Amino acid sequence: MLTETPKKTFTLEEYRQIEETADFRNEYHDGEIIPMTGGSINHNRITRNLARKLGNLLDGQPYEVFSSDLRLWIPRYRRGTYPDVMVISGEPIFNDGRNDEILNPSLIVEVLSKSTQDYDKGDKFRFYRSIPEFSEYVLVNQYEFYVEQYIKNGSGQWLFLAYEGEDAIVRFSSAGVEMSLKDIYEKVNFDVEE
């Protein structure tokens, strides 16, 4: 007879202690610690381009751009994640007075990989939608010039837009700035294998 070994669960405090000294990041899923896979060079280029260029476009405005080193806490689902890029309107709201765990992004960008795209488009988006301030979700394909965008309208409905080709322009509506796909994909080489 085969028996299933129960998964070890961790408290939020245990997870936080592990994250403070970990060599790599882990997500927290309601007691379960999930190791994050490393990103490809193209994934890193896209993330860098977005964070840098959004930061430059928003300079002097009441927005702050964060890259994947800052943890997002999602209270309703007891999840800790590391979005690739987040934009916060106004001041960050920290969870439990911590300076490494925020609660209030208005814009989240995820760079899709083959191993994460289903999760990013499905459950993760559902978790993110529980954040009151969250109003825009952008998914960047790292294998071609293609970006998907979801924008929450005044009625709380999510509208879908898609952009294809290097000359397409994405308007980040929550921050009021635009960026071409050519800028998002600067130095990306689609011939490089993941």
Image (cartoon, rainbow, N blue to C red):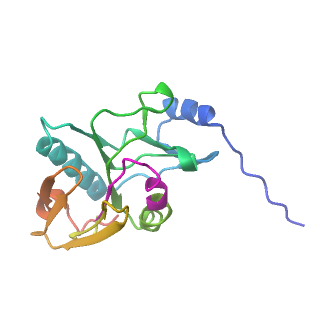
Residue depicted at x 85% and y 65%:
2
Q: Is residue 29 above or below residue 91?
A: below
Task: Please say whether residue 187 is visible from this viewpoint.
Answer: no
Q: In the picture provided, is 29 more to the left or to the right than 126?
A: right
Residue at screen point 41% across, 68% down: 114
Q: Residue at x 56, y 50 (%)?
A: 77
The residue nearer to you, when weighing 44 against 180, is: 180
| Residue 140 shows up from this direction | yes
- Provide residue 105's location: percent of width, then percent of height: 35, 45
Above or below, comparing residue 115 to residue 59 in the picture: below
* Near-viewer residue (167 or 42): 167
Residue 63 drawn in magenta: no
Name the residue at 53% across, 49% down.
35
Q: Quadrant of residue 151?
A: bottom left
| Residue 87 percent coordinates (x, y) | 28, 45
Of 187 and 89, nearer the camera is 89
The image shows a total of numbered marks equal to 0
Q: Is residue 80 above or below residue 127?
A: above
Residue farthest to the top, as pictured: 97
Q: Residue furthest front?
A: 155
Quick check: 185 above or below 12? below
Q: Residue furthest left?
A: 167
**Left or right placement of residue 129 versus residue 56 in this view:** right
Q: What quarter of the picture does the C terminus occupy? A: bottom left
Q: Which residues are magenta?
A: 125-140
Q: In this rendering, would 152 be left or right of 169?
A: right
Which quadrant would the N terminus be assigned to in this image? bottom right
Q: Is residue 128 magenta?
A: yes
Residue 63 drawn at (x, y percent): 22, 39
Horizontal arrangement in the rendering, residue 23 relative to residue 182 (left or right) = right
Image coordinates of residue 89 in percent, x first then y, are 27, 41
